[in-house]
Amino acid sequence: MKTQGKKSIAIDMDGVIADVEAQLIKYYEQVYGVKTTKEAIKGLSGADAFPLDAATRTMIYTPGFFRNLEVIPGAVEALTILKDKYELYIVSAATEFPLSLFEKVEWLKEHFPFITWHNIVLCGDKSIIDTDYMIDDHCKNLNFCKGKAIMFDAHHNQNEAGHARFFSWTEILEYFEQEELKFAEASN
Amino acid sequence: MKTQGKKSIAIDMDGVIADVEAQLIKYYEQVYGVKTTKEAIKGLSGADAFPLDAATRTMIYTPGFFRNLEVIPGAVEALTILKDKYELYIVSAATEFPLSLFEKVEWLKEHFPFITWHNIVLCGDKSIIDTDYMIDDHCKNLNFCKGKAIMFDAHHNQNEAGHARFFSWTEILEYFEQEELKFAEASN
């Protein structure tokens, strides 16, 4: 529940707190014998990074794909800090992959047990989400967000310049510290 | 995607387009031998309508419970009409029941095939949902909605007077016809 006075943040899962890229690279090699790296796909679209499109889709639909993702470094620590001052909502465009829905809730329970079911949103497009901040790696989501947009760096958004880019959760924490200083000054 | 000029409606599932009440009554009798009717539970809270609380929770967690719900009469016809003029989002508080997530998407695919994954939102609380209208049977959702609230009649909301009450999808269609007349007049 949005708490009076507590600002809200919508936080994307894939590419922001859950490392889909690493999982795709791992599966791609395991299943198709094609080796790539995070460095090699930098600046490429999803289709160019993983050109076997049908194969990529098969991987994404494989049971366990979303359940076994690694956590993005620093995400647990950052959300643990942010949750005390902000109302955190995990907002994931997941309904395209119905099998992922259960897995995503289970994954959150394991890695982010302080995020309860109340604050999980699994959706398609995010244009009806209204929070004070949105952290996402896709501009299609950030472009319509009503609050402040925080773009998490990803291989597929290298050419996007419309939103402030953040390379790590450490940088995002610093941003929120600055925001708090600004609010403190404004209220003095 | 919210379309410029098209107003948006958030439509709840359980109790609004999916007949949970009928399913609970059926399961309650089948599993626990306790017979009740829609008339008998009118005005009662969930806990009073189905006093075997643990039993009710067990039913709700039973695989298939949400997949096999009946459609609320008139819902398919109404949404078929409304979808041409409005951007419809199905917004269901479902993350409390992780097993229901997949079933709900499958259920929508069967009964409302014109609602695609883009427009499905499965969430906890609905306070960050921003649409022009919200149709729901729970005041805990309607109280925070940013648009106009449309309360669908249910046994558990008989004592709620804070929102306009609608007894059927026919009445809701009439309401939207009136809304369109108002907009047409205002733009003349």
Image: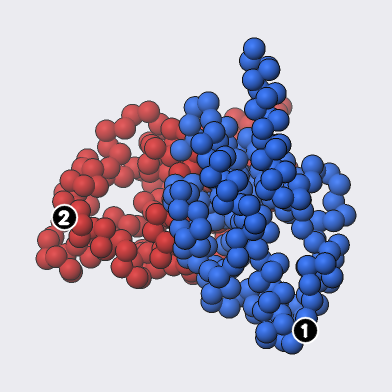
Chain colours: A blue, B red
Name the amino acid, label 2: Leu
Q: Secondary structure at mark 1?
A: loop
Residue with the mark numbered 2: B52
Pointer 1 local density, CA inside 10 Å: few below 14, some 14–19, many at least 20: few
The answer to whether one can see residue B174 in this image is: no
Pointer 2 local density, CA inside 10 Å: few below 14, some 14–19, many at least 20: some
The answer to whether one can see residue B157 in this image is: yes
Percent position of residue B145, x then y: 50, 35
Q: Secondary structure at mark 2?
A: loop
Q: Eyeballing the image, is A171 above or below A30?
A: above
Q: Eyeballing the image, is A82 above or below A66?
A: above
Which residue is at 32% across, 63% downward? B61
Percent position of residue A59, x then y: 64, 78
The quadrant of the picture occupied by the C terminus of chain A is top right
Q: Which of pointers 2 and 1 indicates the residue nearer the eye?
A: 1
Q: Quadrant of residue B163?
A: top left
Name the amino acid, label 1: Val
Seen from the viewer's position, the closer of residues B147 and B185 is B147
Which residue is at 63% across, 41% downward? B7
Percent position of residue B63, x then y: 35, 70
Q: Chain of mark 1?
A: A
Whether tag 2 and tag 1 are in contact, CB under 8 A, the answer is no
The lab-note entry on whether marks 2 and 1 share a chain reads no
Q: Quadrant of residue B137?
A: top left
Which residue is at 68% across, 17% downward? A185
Percent position of residue A48, x then y: 83, 72
In the image: residue A55, left or right of residue A100: right
Which residue is at 75% across, 77% downward? A53
* Residue A34 tag number: 1
Marks 2/1: CA–CA distance: 56 Å
Q: Chain of mark 2?
A: B
